[in-house]
Image: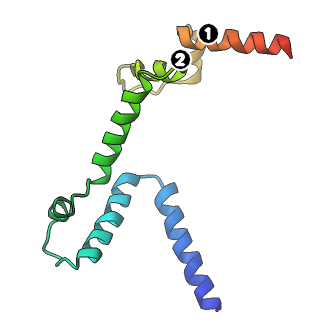
Amino acid sequence: MNNERENTRHKNKRIHSVFYKRGNVLHRLQVIQNKFCRAATDAHWCVRNSILHRDLELPTLSKYMKDASKRFFDIAGSHPNALLRAAVDYQPPPPTHFIRRPRNVLFDPPDTLTAAVDSLNDVNDTHD
């Protein structure tokens, strides 16, 4: 009984380490998916993972996440919520090798969406 509890703890630690450790989480999850595919099909070690996914008609996790993100943003573009529509139009800042520090945020003027949200928050605070 105690041994089973220890095994469960070790499994839980492994699961938590997959999600909370730094690194490429999608890659680690892809490895797990590959192992399940290999076990389900009883495939030999020499069969490529891409062949397994193609034969099972199963997308890789990166392809699935890319498709899910595309579907979300397609739906969000016509959503009645202004915050979701604004997320579709978001343009990330150009990549630089400098780390953006909080002091830089103080000097940047807020965009129109942030200004609108702040004004709504101010109105709600005055009515409370």
- Upstream in sequence: badge 1 or badge 2: 2
Q: Quadrant of residue 68?
A: top left
* Alpha carbons under labels 1 and 2: distance apart: 11 Å
Q: Position of residue 77 (x, y in %)?
A: 41, 22
Q: Is residue 38 above or below residue 112?
A: below
Classify the position of the N terminus by image quarter.
bottom right
Q: Is residue 24 visible?
A: no
* Quarter the C terminus occupies: top right
- Position of residue 19 measured from the top left corner of the image (x, y, whole percent): 49, 57
Q: Amino acid at mark 1?
A: Ala
**Left or right: where does residue 122 sit relative to residue 17?**
right
Q: Work out whether 121 lies above or below 34.
A: above
Q: Secondary structure at mark 1?
A: helix
| Disc 1 + disc 2, Cβ < 8 Å | yes
Residue where numbered disc 1 is placed: 116
Question: Closer to the camera, 54 or 6?
Answer: 54
Q: Which mark is residue 82?
A: 2
Is 19 displayed left or right of 92 in the figure? right
